Image (cartoon, rainbow, N blue to C red):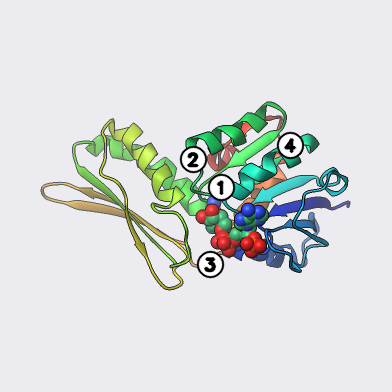
Amino acid sequence: MKKNKLGVLGASGRMGQEILRCLEGQTKFEAFLGWSEREKETGYKHSVTRLDPELVDKVDVWIDFSSPDALTAAIPKISRSKKPIISGTTGLSDVQMKKLKSLATNCAVMWSSNMSLGIAVLMKTLEHLQMISDFDFQIEEFHHKHKKDAPSGTALSLQKKLEKVTQTTLPAPLSLRGGGVIGIHKVWAFGEEETLCFEHMALQRRVFARGALWAAERLLKKPKGFYEFGDLLK
Ligand SMILES: NC(=O)c1ccc[n+]([C@@H]2O[C@H](COP(=O)([O-])OP(=O)(O)OC[C@H]3O[C@@H](n4cnc5c(N)ncnc54)[C@H](OP(=O)(O)O)[C@@H]3O)[C@@H](O)[C@H]2O)c1
């Protein structure tokens, strides 16, 4: 079976390298193009700091775990190929998100602040909190000290969903940074006589890399449009 050529934005980073490890021994994707800011060997077949059309046109599907500015700079270069794009980059401004979404008129685009199955299930579960919408809610998130954005993209997605479900404006998520924590998210619901807490803990970065590859496989079969991780579970 012919492997799909994978182009990764942010190939030298923590997530780009985790994807590379996930590609070992599988038959669906070829680690074809690795784009990063500084010139270095990324382990992908072509390590590049420029997205030249000759290579871009050969990519079958893109995965992005870079930075908001890097993604914005890459969009005009990769859009010409009209190939599916999976983006997990967080911290995008409204304008940057709009640019990403505008690609969906020509190809399939999926953006998710969190590519884990557990968070996708938690998102659905939050709908039940409508029954206790008079409780007090608070989201907490914990991440490694190198994380650039706060609150995390996942905390903001959970917050958006919870505000929609409870029809209230909630206090901003609380962010803690330290050590090597991959990612912990807690959703608290405080009543007068009881407290409820949902907790998701990512044990390995691999969960996000695997999720992105799982999404890539599905997005290759989808028509153009904008998708979220949950849409691919249906
Ligand atoms: N959605 C999810 O499930 C999920 C999970 C984990 C992380 N994330 C998000 O994914 C993103 C990457 O995370 P990470 O931990 O892998 O970060 P990282 O280790 O800092 O890696 C960032 C990568 O982006 C590249 N890059 C940055 N600016 C660039 C530019 N201007 N031009 C070209 N390449 C550029 C870096 O290249 P150099 O090394 O050359 O600078 C590096 O390869 C973050 O936004 C993070 O929050 C999302």
Question: Is label 1 in a helix, a strand or a loop?
Answer: helix
Give the left or right position of residue 33, taking residue 200 as reference.
right
Q: Is the CB of the residue bearing disc 4 within 8 angstroms of ligand 1?
A: no
CA neighbours of label 1 inside 10 A, class few (<14), some (14 to 19), many (20+) = some
Q: How far apart in space, not on screen, are marks 4 and 3 (Cα)?
A: 31 Å
> Residue at 77% of width from left, 52% of height from top?
50
Residue 79's disc is 4
Question: Is label 3 in a helix, a strand or a loop?
Answer: loop
Tell me the amino acid under the disc marked 3: Gln
In front here: 49 or 170? Answer: 49
Residue 204's disc is 3
Tell me the amino acid under the disc marked 4: Ser
Residue 93's disc is 2
Whether residue 48 can be seen here: yes
Cβ–Cβ under 8 Å for marks 2 and 1:
yes
Residue 68's disc is 1
Q: List x then y, in percent, for residue 63.
A: 68, 50
Q: Earlier in the sequence, mark 4 or mark 3?
A: 4
Whether residue 115 can be seen here: no
Q: Which of marks 3 and 1 is nearer the N terminus?
A: 1
> Residue at 26% of width from left, 49% of height from top?
138
CA neighbours of label 4 inside 10 A, class few (<14), some (14 to 19), many (20+) = some
